[in-house]
Image (cartoon, rainbow, N blue to C red):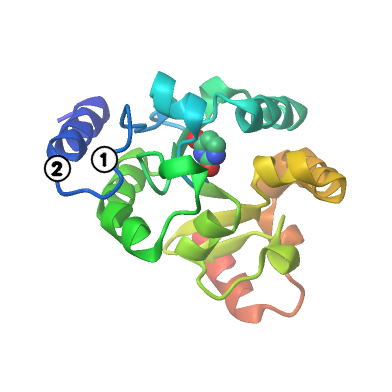
Amino acid sequence: MTKSDELDQLKCELTANKGLPLREGATNLVFGEGDINAKVVLIGEAPGFHEDRLARPFVGNAGSLLNKLLLKSGLSREEVYITNIVKYRPPDNRDPLPLEIQAFAPYLVRQVEIINPSFIVTLGRFSMNYFLPQAKISEVHGRPLVLGGRIIIPMFHPAAALRRSEILDLIESDFEKLPQIILSPEDFMVKGDDENKDQMTLFN
Ligand code: URA
């Protein structure tokens, strides 16, 4: 089976699973889009109003900012893959609940395995905490970590940047650094994190 077939099958399984939370209140499943061979996968939180309508991730205001940030980093939407941890819109755009995140987790795991990126950019704390449950976004944003043979790069959520100008400054500078982080992740790791450094050596 090709990667594209595998992703189609996964999407069909998601669509067919009537037991998934948030399904009733949503208009569409927002599976994800982009280059299925991408080296970089970006993972947000959950679809919002516009995403739910169009069945596409990050197409509202946060999406416009994300497009600009990607352009700044020299990457285009076409060369990355974008998805969310939760694939249906939570009512009134509330935060996803732990049980909801858990219900979609097996699908996200498979989606990432199929695409098999070297880098995962997490957008916001929900996506980051899915991979790094103890991490604090204010401490680790823009700092790559090795996890399961991939490099996780935590970033703030673009929607948070739209609300607070100090976050906008930070997310802009993190995205500007993204090409260098991808080229040489060990230069951006937290100093003294020897365990991670060892893993990074193994990874390279
Ligand atoms: N916010 C997200 O986390 N994901 C989207 O797809 C849109 C907004």
- Spatial CA distance of label 1 from label 2 is 9 Å
Residue bearing mark 1: 23
As shown in the figure, which amino acid type bears the numbered disc 1? Answer: Arg
The reply to whether the residue tagged 1 has its Cβ within 8 angstroms of ligand 1 is no
Residue at 23% of width from left, 33% of height from top? 11
Q: Quadrant of the C terminus?
A: bottom right
Q: Nearer the viewer, residue 93 or 165?
A: 93
Q: Can residue 81 be seen in this snapshot?
A: no
Determine whether, in the image, residue 128 is placed left or right of residue 184.
left
Provide residue 32's location: percent of width, then percent of height.
39, 32
Write down the quadrant of residue 53 in the picture: top left
Cβ–Cβ under 8 Å for marks 1 and 2: yes
Residue bearing mark 2: 17
Provide residue 118's location: percent of width, then percent of height.
49, 47
As shown in the figure, which amino acid type bears the numbered disc 2? Answer: Asn
Provide residue 184's location: percent of width, then percent of height.
70, 51
Q: Can residue 131 be seen in this snapshot?
A: yes
Write down the quadrant of residue 55 in the picture: top left
Give the secondary structure at mark 1.
Answer: loop
Residue at 38% of width from left, 44% of height from top? 116
Determine whether, in the image, residue 74 is placed left or right of residue 3.
right
Mark 1: few/some/many CA within 10 Å (<14, 14-19, 20+): some
Tell me which label, 1 or 2, sits earlier in the chain: 2
- Vertical placement of residue 34 versus 24, above or below: above
- Vertical placement of residue 182 versus 202, above or below: above
Give the secondary structure at mark 2.
Answer: loop
Write down the quadrant of residue 187 in the picture: bottom right
Q: Quadrant of the N terminus?
A: top left
